[in-house]
Amino acid sequence: MKLKIPIQAKKNVYKAIIHNQILGNKCSTIVGKHRSNQILEDKPMSKKTLQRTYAYLSRAKVYATGDWSRCGTISYNLWGGDAMHDYLKKLFKK
């Protein structure tokens, strides 16, 4: 599925990548890194992948405290953070 990913979601991903690198890349899984690349590069994602992304963001939101030295915030934002969550929520309501 080709998306119009919000700019803020991409900014969240970029910021999370930088902070993750500062912490030695300890805050992401292979899936998280792959998802961040898909978002940054506007790569098409299947409906199933988008649903999993929305499910992850819905669960992980509680770990995103806004403290960029914490893995919860970094991991959540590697998936696009609040901007991606809100975008997917609207997409799936259609």
Image (spheres, rainbow, N blue to C red):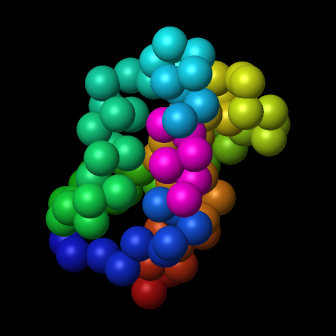
| Magenta-tinted stretch | 11-17
The C terminus: image quadrant: bottom left
Image quarter (top left, top right, bottom left or bottom right) of the N terminus = bottom left
Magenta stretch, main secondary structure class: helix
Percent x, y for residue 30? 30, 24
- Given the current orientation, which residue lies at the most extreme bottom position? 94
Residue 83, position as x, y percentages in the image: 60, 65
Q: Residue at x 38, y 22 (%)?
A: 29
Residue 92 location, quadrant: bottom left
The answer to whether residue 78 shows anywhere in this view is yes
Q: Front-most of 26 and 64?
A: 26
Quadrant in the picture for residue 3: bottom left
- For the question of whether residue 56 can be seen, the reply is no
Residue drawn 39% across and 34% down?
A: 32
Q: Position of residue 65 (x, y in %)?
A: 81, 36
Out of 58 and 15, give the one closest to the viewer: 15
Q: Residue at the location (27% across, 65% down)?
A: 42
Q: Is residue 10 above or below residue 13?
A: below
Q: Indicate the position of residue 2 as horizontal and vertical percent values.
A: 21, 75
